[in-house]
């Protein structure tokens, strides 16, 4: 029977034989801290620690756990032996082999000579499961799954799909609004992920959504690659602008596909098998059975994905919609077609009214909505949205480069009621006042504020909003040590008719859109890569058994644990000799040990040793 040290040697050798991509994948899945690992023996030991094991075992389904437990209960087994011992879980040899491969990839099993064995840490961990109210090997194999859920076909399928479409359309627009908010006002990212409560409350008010909906919208947007964190702040990604220009059904499809791809494969299978069943207690009972080592963790995931499925119209009233069934079992194109048929049609014209409001009788086409938002503030968001034109909104538009004539032409083009006289007056007045306050560069890094209206300049000087800028009078202007953009946006937010200018007085167009510079598809934790480099450099950068540093480390482990080694030596004449040795020292490029067969001490140069292997012979 293999000892702990035998397994350590075998597992360390298996880990060392992995290529860089395989090893990197393992390090990411097991979360090993590099400060405790200097070589592959340390890594083998770290992977057997309780925290590391629990982290990976919670992700494994019952058939995979049963496969591991069957192997752990024996010395070693072939794949056929494993399949025979698994009962109903062993009927498909291909599935059994796939599970065995996965367990080897996770360093939960050792594969050598066509046989599988378990590291001692895994065996010991599983032996303690019954004391922690987790299933024994027999219970993993014999406990039947919950009864099959009864299929339900709603009597009012059309009504269900309408509810789903309403939710999907609302969520798509709310994600759009979330991006608009984050472009100008990023929010703080919590260390554990998500948005802080004060920021969530602010977003809920500005977006006109319930507070408890904000977290789901951020999850959906992050999963779709539309938001990411930079410097601990949530911001839109570079892809968000292009997404916002698409039609509503195209935006929905992007969100829904990202949701579907983000669902763990095991959960995706569960949901696809239950497209005509209620999602709720029945699904959760099945998850409890399927993931006995990760019940709480997996249920939390299922509940989050179920919540987002409801928001996206994949489900309604806990039943998959027609579009949801298509997404789960057929193609995204079919899902998009089913949902698009129920979405309200986009409109390309609005009603511009004398009270300075702009009413869109339906969802405004994205390009028109984006430009109208620069000219008017959004007051209500629904199928019929309301915008309001104001002096501050027009100053904001001109800050972004809009001109009086450009705004007039745009409003005239989209308005079903022309441009009323009060709107014309407001446009002209805003244009005449825009730039009444000017901000420019003072010195090399500071800024100045100036205006021909001395009373307006004095108001800024005494305005408590600008106390942090330390404004001080200097001839005909106020100066500050802060930069132009900081001062400019502070004045703009305070609703002053401000414009930025260059050194010769030309007005500059400034934008405050903030975009995350993170690529959401790339892992942010560099530790696995650093540990990979450390492991390779610590072993001389080689992966073959001829490496002397690796040989020395194997022999040291054998000495420390009083193991016998089978040592293969290449003689000067090319012959290979096999000795069974009890090693005593390794130093100065040589190994000394007692040859049990000849009962003599042997000293072998490491350069002649082409392989070592732990043995149970005595």
Image (cartoon, rainbow, N blue to C red):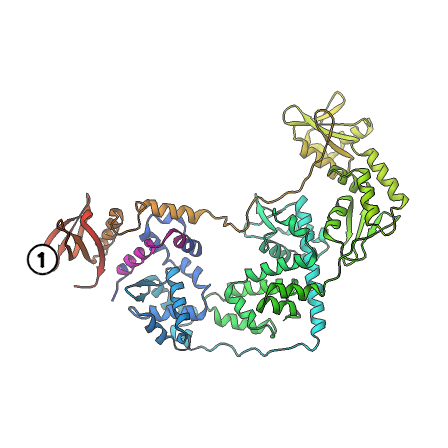
Query: In the image, what residue occupies the spot 67% across and 54% down?
Result: 175
| Direction right: furthest residue | 421
- 418 left or right of 196 in image: right
Residue 159 position by quadrant: bottom right
| Residue 308 appears in the picture as rendered | yes
- 63 left or right of 418 in image: left
Q: Position of residue 595 (x, y in %)?
A: 12, 56
Residue 479 position by quadrant: top right
| Residue 321 appears in the picture as rendered | no
Instruction: For mark 1, give the secondary structure.
Output: loop
| Direction top: furthest residue | 475
Quadrant location, the N terminus: bottom left
Quadrant location, the C terminus: bottom left
- 270 left or right of 555 in image: right
Residue 347 versus residue 339 in the image, above or below? above
Q: Main secondary structure of the magenta part?
A: helix
Give the magenta range: 6-23
Q: Position of residue 291 (x, y in %)?
A: 48, 68
Q: Position of residue 222 (x, y in %)?
A: 59, 53
Taking depth in this image into account, of 212 and 306 the one nearest to the observer is: 306
Q: Position of residue 270 (x, y in %)?
A: 53, 70
Q: Does the magenta run of residues contain 19? A: yes
Query: In the image, what residue occupies the spot 24% across and 47% down?
Result: 548
Q: Does the magenta run of residues contain 157? A: no
Residue 475 versus residue 82 in the image, above or below? above
Q: Mark 1: give few (<14), some (14-19) or many (20+) Cα within 10 Å.
A: few
Q: How many marks overall?
A: 1
Residue 233 versus residue 482 in the image, above or below? below
Residue behind mark 1 = 599
């Amino acid at each position: 029977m293999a000892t702990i040290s035998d397994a350590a040697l075998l597992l360390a050798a298996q880990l060392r034989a992995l290529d860089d991509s395989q090893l990197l994948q393992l390090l990411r899945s097991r979360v090993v801290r590099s400060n405790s690992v200097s070589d592959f023996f340390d890594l083998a030991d770290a992977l057997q620690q309780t925290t590391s094991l629990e982290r990976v075992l919670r992700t494994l389904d019952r058939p995979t756990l049963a496969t591991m437990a069957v192997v752990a209960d024996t010395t070693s087994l072939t794949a056929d032996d494993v399949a025979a011992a698994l009962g109903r879980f062993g009927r498909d040899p291909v599935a059994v082999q796939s599970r065995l491969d996965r367990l080897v990839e996770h360093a939960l099993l050792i594969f050598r000579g066509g046989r599988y064995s378990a590291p001692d840490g895994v065996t010991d961990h599983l032996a303690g499961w019954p004391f922690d109210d987790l299933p024994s090997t027999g219970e993993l194999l014999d406990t039947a799954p919950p009864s099959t859920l009864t299929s339900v076909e709603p009597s009012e399928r059309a009504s269900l799909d309408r509810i789903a479409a309403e939710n999907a359309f609302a969520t798509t627009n709310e994600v759009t609004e979330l991006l608009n908010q984050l472009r100008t006002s990023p929010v703080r990212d919590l260390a554990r992920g998500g948005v802080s409560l004060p920021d969530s409350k602010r977003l809920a008010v500005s977006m006109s959504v319930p507070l408890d909906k904000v977290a789901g919208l951020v999850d959906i947007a992050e999963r779709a690659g539309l938001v990411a964190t930079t410097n601990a702040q949530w911001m839109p990604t570079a892809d968000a602008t292009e997404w916002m220009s698409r039609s509503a059904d195209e935006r929905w499809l992007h969100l829904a596909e990202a949701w579907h791809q983000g669902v763990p494969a095991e959960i995706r299978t569960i949901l696809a098998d239950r497209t005509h069943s209620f999602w709720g207690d029945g699904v959760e009972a099945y998850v409890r059975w399927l993931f006995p080592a990760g019940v709480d963790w997996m249920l939390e995931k299922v509940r989050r994905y179920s919540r987002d499925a409801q928001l996206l119209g994949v489900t309604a009233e806990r039943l998959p919609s027609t579009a949801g069934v298509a997404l789960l079992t057929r193609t995204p194109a079919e899902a998009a077609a089913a949902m698009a048929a129920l979405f309200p049609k986009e409109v390309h014209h609005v009603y511009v009214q004398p009270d300075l409001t702009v009413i869109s009788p339906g969802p405004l086409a994205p390009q028109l909505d984006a430009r109208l938002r620069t000219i008017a503030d959004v007051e209500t968001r629904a199928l019929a949205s309301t915008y309001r034109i104001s002096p501050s909104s027009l100053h904001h538009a001109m800050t972004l480069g809009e001109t009086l004539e450009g705004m007039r032409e745009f409003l005239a083009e989209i308005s079903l009621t022309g441009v009323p006289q009060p709107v014309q007056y407001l446009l002209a007045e805003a244009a005449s006042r825009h730039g009444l306050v000017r901000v420019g560069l003072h010195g090399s890094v500071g800024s100045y504020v100036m205006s021909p209206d001395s009373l307006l300049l004095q108001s800024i000087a005494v305005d408590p909003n600008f106390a942090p800028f330390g404004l001080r009078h200097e001839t005909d202007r106020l100066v500050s040590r802060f930069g132009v953009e900081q001062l400019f946006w502070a004045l703009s937010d305070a609703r002053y008719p401000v414009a930025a200018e260059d050194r010769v007085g030309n007005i500059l167009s400034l934008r405050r859109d903030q975009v995350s510079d993170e690529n959401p598809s790339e892992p942010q934790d560099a530790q696995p890569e650093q540990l990979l480099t450390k492991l390779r450099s610590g072993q001389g950068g080689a992966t073959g058994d001829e490496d002397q540093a690796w040989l020395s480390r194997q022999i040291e482990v054998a000495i420390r644990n009083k193991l016998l080694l089978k040592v293969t030596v290449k003689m000067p004449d090319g012959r290979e000799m096999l000795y069974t040795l009890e090693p005593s020292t390794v130093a100065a490029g040589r190994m000394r040990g007692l040859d049990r067969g000849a009962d003599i001490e042997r000293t072998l140069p490491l350069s002649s040793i082409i392989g070592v292997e732990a043995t149970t012979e005595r």
